[in-house]
Amino acid sequence: MRLPVLVLLLACNPAAPSKDEPGGTDAGDTGTLPAPEACGYTAAEDLDPADDVVEVDLRASSYAWDPGTGVPLEAGLAFDEQVPGPLLEATRGDTLRVNFTNDTDLELTIHWHGLRVSPEMDGVMQMMDPVQPGETFTYELALQDSGYYWYHPHMSGDTVLERGLYGNIIVREPGEGRADCELPLVLDDVLLDEDTWQIEPPDTDMMQLMGRLGNKLLANGRTDRRIAVTKGQTLLLRLVNSANARFWDLRLEGHTMKVVATDGGFVAEPWEVDHLLLVPGERYVVAVEATGEPGEEYRLLNARFQLHDEHESDMVEVDPMGDGENPVLSLVYGDGSVEGTPWVQPTPDVPAWDRAADAFGHQWVLQEDMMGGTVTLDGETWPDVPMVSVAGNTDTTFEVFNDSEMHHPFHIHGNRFQIVAIDGVAPTTPVGWKDTWDVAPQSTVTVVSALDNPGEWMVHCHILEHAEDGMAGLMTVEP
Ligand code: C2O
Ligand code: CU
């Protein structure tokens, strides 16, 4: 029964790695290593003099950016002609005002992924008219939570994110300390034609169903980032996964990563990992002690992650990156060493969940019909998925049951959640605020929320092809 799927996969994947590419493994890369760039970032300019308002202009337009192949992408799009778009930085309690101008020829909205904003500012089509080409719309966001967030259009997500429309947001705790070297990193992949190095049109049904995996891995929009660090520094890597479907399984050669924050802010108790799973839409912030020696270079590596459960072994999934590990970027140690500033974990704005919920909200069921080529939420596809209605300001439990053979990263807008159980068992890592999480095949993730942000909110799979295909619904949180 599954054999046709296997055949389709092999036949339809345009980017199955070819063994005899001219130019060897570097084909499509410029070949020469770029000089290491300084660790750090520049935030978008704040146009408002008030202390508690950050105002920025943000303009989306066509922009042929070079992902590191040496060939600019003709279909490229960008915010302010940079990929990722400008980093928006503010402090919890601030208002973030974004004057968004749409200079593309597409209708667009911007969604502020993870921020608990008001429904009409959430950038989804149920709540606002799309911003038409040539128009400007001002988003006004009251920042309730510190954390690491990101922004992206919420229309045609499967194509416009691929083309470059995404950026990140840092909301700091008042008085939050700085690491010696802070590196916000948006991890993405793109699927490029290996002759032209242009974006492949995502036009196959199978790619829609499987999620589109790229054949180039991008850190902040480039295949070839090298970051200068110094022995002794404390590094803070802020990671967001903006890829359509890729689950990153990351490790940093020669270093241990310590998780200090989840999607919605700092955790009470950091924990060490030797590798880190980052699913589409999800964020983690990790602290790293720079213990290397001058002249050494260490790579952030991504291992292949199988989206499908292969227990029915005739199910074959092809990753255009191949089966092994691939470099994402590298840390290059410069001369000398410094007395680093030890990382001081900020006190999280809200402690971990420690109480029983008062209500059971809903169980969402994720399914897919490989033969029929559809993914569904509660047995239907958008916009036919039944609305879920729950009482607000009530501690509420939800379940997400993945009744399929493929991982789905589940995302809920508007409120924040903590994972309290996976298949009935409490997670082993300390909890933190989440808005996006993996739901493994045939497994159930139980989450709780205080539902203190009423409104009508989208819930969907963050494999962008699945969201576009209808694995999406709405939840009304009553005031
Ligand atoms: Cu990042 Cu509804 O999405
Ligand atoms: Cu999905």
Image (cartoon, rainbow, N blue to C red):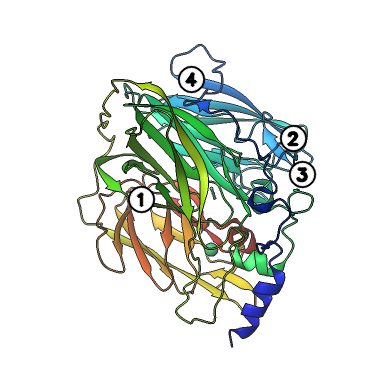
State which mark lies toward you, 1 or 2: 2
Type of amino acid at the residue the image marks with label 2 = Tyr
Location of mark 4 (residue) = 53
Mark 4 lies on a secondary structure that is: strand
Type of amino acid at the residue the image marks with label 3 = Ala
The answer to the question of whether label 2 and label 3 lie on touching residues, with beta carbons closer than 8 A, is no
Give the percent coordinates (x, y) of residue 384: 60, 67
Give how far apart the Cα atoms at labels 1 and 4 are. Answer: 27 Å
Location of mark 3 (residue) = 75
Q: Is 396 left or right of 375, judged from the image as shown?
A: left
Q: Is 468 left or right of 305, judged from the image as shown?
A: right
Mark 3 lies on a secondary structure that is: loop
Q: Which mark is residue 417?
A: 1
Give how far apart the Cα atoms at labels 2 and 3 are. Answer: 8 Å
Type of amino acid at the residue the image marks with label 4 = Val
Residue visible at 74% across and 34% down in the picture? 61
For marks 3 and 4 on the same chain, the one whose residue lies earlier in the sequence: 4
State which mark lies toward you, 3 or 1: 3
